[in-house]
Image: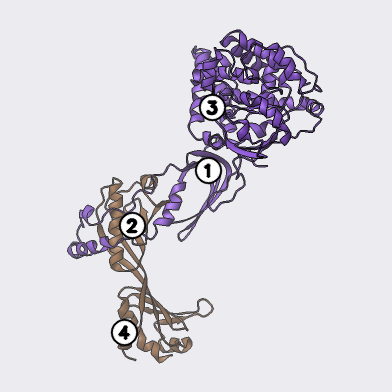
Amino acid sequence: MDADSDVALDILITNVVCVFRTRCHLNLRKIALEGANVIYKRDVGKVLMKLRKPRITATIWSSGKIICTGATSEEEAKFGARRLARSLQKLGFQVIFTDFKVVNVLAVCNMPFEIRLPEFTKNNRPHASYEPELHPAVCYRIKSLRATLQIFSTGSITVTGNLLCYCCGQIYPFVFESR
Amino acid sequence: MAGINPVPKLYKSIIEDVIEGVRDLFTEEGIEEHVLNDLKQLWETKVLQSKATEDFFGNSIHSPLFTLQFPHTLHPTLQSTASLVIPANRTVPGFTTAELGISNPSASFTFPGYPIYVPAGVTFQTASGHLYKVNVPVMVAQTSGRPSVLQHPVQVFPQLGQPSVIQGSVPLLSPWCLPATPEKAPRMEAVFQQPTVLHSVPVDRKHLDSATSGVFVPPGREHGSLPEALLSQHGNSPCVQGPGVGFHSRGSPVDSHVEPVLSVPARVTPHLRGGPVSACPQGTLLHPVTDAQPHLPRHCRYGGDSANRPGEAAEPSSLPVSKENSNSRVDLTNQLTDDDINEIIQVDGTVDTSSNEEIGNIKDSEENEFLEIIDAGELKVLEEEADSISNEDSTANSSDNEGSQADIVEEDPLNSGDDVSEQDVPDLFDTDNVIVCQYDKIHRNKNKWKFYLKDGVMCFGGRDYVFAKAIGDAEW
């Protein structure tokens, strides 16, 4: 009922997706041959480069657009992205780190109670959609925040989007009603 | 039975094929034959020395431990032959009778660098597990046992830079001649400097056969009588002579000799079957050959004549002849299982499944549609490295983050170098362990990789392994 309860909740960020541009054309073949820890997917025209330190997988296109996934925090994502750009620079490309943007953050949150989904859905008609035959969770979309929450009957909630904490906080009251 | 290492043979065959293939081109260009042969020699030498194949034989060379079982009845024999144990110029006895252990029923010793004399009736076991029962006093030498293309012996010597070796081998052919003539002495030294692997006897026999036209010794002949006869023929030869017939399994000091040796016995095998049985009523198991005996005297005689000629004359004639699987001399009695002796080295694991790779047999395929180079060493290193993460970078970077946030919208200079420090463990790649192969499938699940490889060569620890299929698992 109260936002205070939020404090007790653990929100774990499991994934951060970000993108950035290098503003230069990248020769994928060269990256594939000379780079370390790369997977070349020639059929789709991508190179995957995996980093260890921030556990990150980056998808690199020849246009210079890079999508970086797997980080556990926004900061780490940025850090990893820079690292990646650095390694590309070392390979000889004139890389400029621009347009860094966090695209998506995936977090998991666990409610200490179970949730009755049909009831919840009824109460939150416009936002919640529930198709038990398709997926066991209620899909709750917050348009203003462009976030999507998947609410399971066990009480665990998966949130994807930006500004997650706020989302969680927002949803709590509604969920609490239907526990 | 452990698999015989296929790699050296494979490489040899590859060399053969290539050389034959370009022979025409060479002649077209007007280049002389010997140039091609030189090339071939150089190539072979390099391959053999490259450790890629040498190691296969290296093990046996480095620590050939022989365990000898002496029947007690040998005592008197040993006594008399004590002085004969030492071949060639070596003054240090390989083992004395005392050591031999008339007192001990068995003794084990490491093969000295020179051939040793093993009296009859001894059973010995090599490090690789081969069991040899010696019915007749034997000279046991250690050779590389490497199969090699037969080359004209004359050519071989200088090219391989071991001229003395081959020449030395001649005297080795007959135990009598070991210390041989003074001319041979220097050569003998050279020979003995080269560790060699136990070599099949039939080879010698063959050589002797071809070399000598003559002495026919009925298989049934007594061992004891033979040496007497032979001895009488070479009274003046300062060779090591023993009461028993000494045949000697000479390792061909030169690689080039080995292959003909190897191939010959194989071919000769069918012929010999009859012989051995009759010759050794005792029912020897494997090896020692008494056949060589009859020819030894003849050979010795040749050897005594002049320094090089006999050896070389014998060699060239013997080799080509043997190669052709010529004579008869089928009467020769026993026969060794050649390959067993020739390649004492055993490389297990043709079907070994280790956690990483499987090794199979295959000839290199020449259609290289897709070659992939994988660092085998990297796989292991990758696993180990997983945990070594330092946090210095993140702290450094956070400060950088604050500074650069203002610039996010605009170009964000990767001032980089400083902040985003080097990836730790930058070079897992400094390994020499390489696999060159084709792949069937490479699969990844999260950080677990599975490799299904085919038709490749792996260079691991300096040694080459050839495989038709290889399956691997790795964690990144």
- A116 to the left or right of B261: left
Per the model, the C-alpha gap separating discs 1 and 3 is 53 Å
Q: Which residue is mark 1?
A: B438
**Figure check: A62 above or below A124:** above
Mark 1 lies on a secondary structure that is strand
Q: Residues within 10 Å of mark 2 (few under 14, many from 20)?
A: many
Q: Which residue is mark 2?
A: A66
> Percent from the top left, x then y, of residue A158?
41, 76
Q: Which residue is mark 4?
A: A7
Task: Decide if residue B222 is in sight here.
Answer: yes
Identify the chain of the residue marked 2, using the numbered disc in the image. A
> Percent from the top left, x then y, of residue B87?
59, 23
Say whether disc 4 or disc 2 marks the residue closer to the N-terminus.
4
Identify the chain of the residue marked 3, using the numbered disc in the image. B
Same subunit, labels 3 and 2: the answer reads no
> Percent from the top left, x then y, of residue B189?
52, 21
Foreground: disc 3 or disc 2: 3
Q: Which residue is mark 3?
A: B92
**Figure check: B132 above or below B250:** below
Which colour is chain B painted? purple
Mark 4 lies on a secondary structure that is helix
The disc labelled 4 sits on which kind of residue?
Val
**Figure check: B433 above or below B388:** above
Foreground: disc 4 or disc 2: 4
> Percent from the top left, x then y, of residue B353?
59, 51
The disc labelled 2 sits on which kind of residue?
Ile
Q: Residues within 10 Å of mark 4 (few under 14, many from 20)?
A: few
